Amino acid sequence: MPSITASILTLLVSSSVVLAVPAPVASSSAAPVSQISDGQPQAPYSTVVPVSQISDGQPQAPTAQASSSTPAQGSSSAPALATPASTVSASSPYSACGSDCICPYAAPYLHDLATANGKLYFGTATDQPGTGEDTDIIYQKILNNTHIFGQVTPANGMKGMNTEPELGVFNYTMGDVVVNIAQDHNKILRCHNLIWSTQQPEWLTSENYTWTRETLLPVMENHIKTIITHWADVCHAWDVVNEAFASNGSSSASPWLDIIGPDYLPLAFQYAHEAVQATGKDIDLYYNDYGIESPGNKTNAVYQLVRDLQAQGIQIAVGLEAHFTVLDPNTYANQAAVMSGLQDLGVTFALTELDVRFPTLPPNATYSYEAQAYRYWESVSACMQYSKCEGITVWDFEDKYSWIPETFEGQGEADLYNSDYSRKPAYYAVAEALQGQACTVCGDVSQYQTTDSDTCADPSGNCN
């Protein structure tokens, strides 16, 4: 989703040949002295576990509402909240944590919980190199902890402008940075993305090229097949086409659409399917989009794409990006309805870019950390109800590197970790959702629940 930084563009422009896989990137900078003690970075206290809630090294669970068990698969009713509690019970995921609860590397471990409860992964996007993530020691230690994040997605390194910067000249340098992370730390790799209207090579829209359908189709085919073949041994899945539908279900603006026509979308999947068959590998092929987390015209268009490709024997899976604000309405019910439809189609799907941003900053009584936690919990809980939902990816995990402030002015703090690497309530809400547990960190959710699915609670209008 986010645009690439100028430093990455500079790196890209200077590269014009096919490069071999580089050696793993080593971190070259040290953590601040104030954050290091006995060789270990120390996480500061935060709003996640305020000092007033710590007693004998144990954080105390906030009061919540009455609870019942989570719903059966396919239910559109959100699981209820936990019974009131003034202390953490012996069965709580925090009970064995001790004073390390404030540590950004400690249990609960999200990937471990996901796999223990039937999912393939819990993972994160990462945007390296060029953003500072690759030289941030604490960031690297959290990212590389496969107990927390067992899957990784390159946020930008595999997009068209980076992989084929010159027509017919492929560059794998940036993508290989995240490939190395996945291989070095035994992580699943989701590869993102092949065809999109944005962040494409300059030659696609350059006046130096006069494209026609007949000339661009083989170029698109070559791009898709070359990239899939190159990374065939490492990619569990590819986002083949990204964000091709408008909110009304029509095709969204794209140079691929303008030049080739609307069938560029199924043709892209056909080429990807042929490439995967040629490799003999088991690679999932995803259509990925935002705004398809609730029923509507755009979601119906995705359903129809699935039916059309299935009828042709062409593989497809569906990625629900899941970019929300803290007060988006009916998050659980809407996602459950969409997921039920995908499950009925027999198609694999996943939450691919989950984050929950604050529409105004700083957070307050209306836009609270508890409300954010509840939205995360709803999304993960919905995925956990459906066997075809294979996993969850957050779109990076630490506010310092979030794409939100650059894209939505005045908004942010969308991730599971604060900029000081302390965990938000949302982190623990996700852990509870992965276990099918009620949320103990969400507070009184009645203040941010709504019954009108057509109402956008974000005053800026940026829902989904």
Image (cartoon, grey):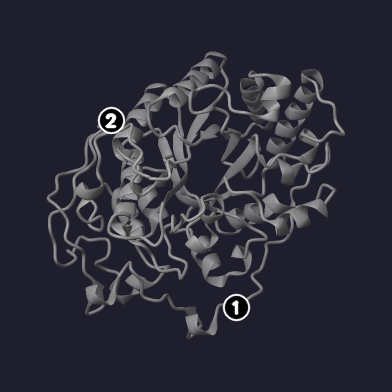
Q: Which residue is mark 2?
A: 74
Say which of 2 and 264 sits in front: 2
Q: Is residue 173 visible?
A: yes
Q: Is residue 274 visible?
A: no
Q: Is residue 73 left or right of residue 163?
A: left
As displayed, is residue 392 above or below residue 168? below
Say which of 254 and 74 sits in front: 254
Say which of 367 and 334 sits in front: 367
Under tag 1, what secondary structure? loop
As displayed, is residue 65 above or below residue 199? below
Amino acid beneath label 1:
Ala
Residue at 55% over, 66% down: 140
Amino acid beneath label 2:
Gly
Q: Position of residue 346 (x, y in %)?
A: 42, 24
Q: Position of residue 209 (x, y in %)?
A: 85, 31
Q: Which residue is mark 1?
A: 30
